[in-house]
Image: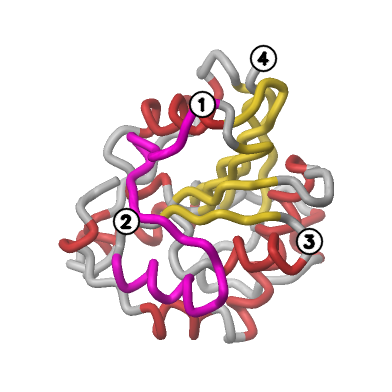
């Protein structure tokens, strides 16, 4: 991951977006996409790589899973711990865990801040058990272009982000499946009805399996 000290994350501002009507709905749509690929067994030990303030990991914990978080930014890491989550310091490209430690691994809207996406995928596959799943969710399409525009305007967060092409995931040897969602573009009304349409998606979920 990019050095956390150079990114001015504000945990309270970050979490406040999830409390807005649009933020709540987008979060539900993306979460539904992730779980459509994950299917974890209750009680599974799941690692959330680049957990941010721990929003997705908290969902896992509340559903009865043993969630472990990894986050390099100290303020975001502390925010996750305040939510009762186990959160360790570290970067995706060098996970501080032994081989085959977890039943599943997830990483949601974090790859945009990785230094080396392919190395990070290999690390996530290393720490998942044989037959286990790795699910990566990332921003794409119109939403990626929207944030890239903000980056060019000097946005304090997105100026540090990089939005990878889908092919970097689908060409990986352990790639299994990809699903898309968030058919509403920035500036449009977000709704479940739009998810039934064929508009360009703004979020992708990729499934990898360790053989």
The label shown at residue 131 is none
For label 1, the crowd category at 10 Å Cα-Cα, with few meaning under 14, some 14 to 19 and many 20 or more, is some
For label 4, the crowd category at 10 Å Cα-Cα, with few meaning under 14, some 14 to 19 and many 20 or more, is few
Q: Which residue is found at the position 68% from the left and 51% from the top? A: 181
| Measured Cα–Cα span from mark 2 to mark 1 | 20 Å
| Measured Cα–Cα span from mark 4 to mark 2 | 29 Å
| Measured Cα–Cα span from mark 2 to mark 3 | 25 Å
| Measured Cα–Cα span from mark 3 to mark 4 | 26 Å
Q: Nearer the viewer, mark 4 or mark 1?
A: 1
Question: Counting residues from the N terminus, which is met first, the one under dot 3 or under dot 1?
Answer: 3
Is residue 81 part of the magenta span, yes or no? Answer: yes
| Measured Cα–Cα span from mark 3 to mark 1 | 24 Å
Question: Counting residues from the N terminus, which is met first, the one under dot 3 or under dot 4?
Answer: 3
Q: Secondary structure at mark 2?
A: loop
Residue 167: percent from the left, percent from the top?
48, 25
Marks 4 and 1 close (CB-CB < 8 Å): no
Bounds of the magenta segment: 74-99
The label shown at residue 64 is 3
Side of 75 where 129 appears, left or right:
right
Q: Which residue is found at the position 31% from the left and 33% from the top? A: 116
Q: Which residue is found at the position 39% from the left and 38% from the top? A: 95
- In the image, residue 133 sits, relative to residue 1, either above or below, namely above
Marks 3 and 4 close (CB-CB < 8 Å): no
Which residue is under mark 4?
211
Side of 186 where 30 appears, left or right:
right
Which residue is under mark 2?
72
Question: In which quadrant will I find the C terminus?
Answer: top right
Q: Secondary structure at mark 1?
A: loop
């Amino acid at each position: 991951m990019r050095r956390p000290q150079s990114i001015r994350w504000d945990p309270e501002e970050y979490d406040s977006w999830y409390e807005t009507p649009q933020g709540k709905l987008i979060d539900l749509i993306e979460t539904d996409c992730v779980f459509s690929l994950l299917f974890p067994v209750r009680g599974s030990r799941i690692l959330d790589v680049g957990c941010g303030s721990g929003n997705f990991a908290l969902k896992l914990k509340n559903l009865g899973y043993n969630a472990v978080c990894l986050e390099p930014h100290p303020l975001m890491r502390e925010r996750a711990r305040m939510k009762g989550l186990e959160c360790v310091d570290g970067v995706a490209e060098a996970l501080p865990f032994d081989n085959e430690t977890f039943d599943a691994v997830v990483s949601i809207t974090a790859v945009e801040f990785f230094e080396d996406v392919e190395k990070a995928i290999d690390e996530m596959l290393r720490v998942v058990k044989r037959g286990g799943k790795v699910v990566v969710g990332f921003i794409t399409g119109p939403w990626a272009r929207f944030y890239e525009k903000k980056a060019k305007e000097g946005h304090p967060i997105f100026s540090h982000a990089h939005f990878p092409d889908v092919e970097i995931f689908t060409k990986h040897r352990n790639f299994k499946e990809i699903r898309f969602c968030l058919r509403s573009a920035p500036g449009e009304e977000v709704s479940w009805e739009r998810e039934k349409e064929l508009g360009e998606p703004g979020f992708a979920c990729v499934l990898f399996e360790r053989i």
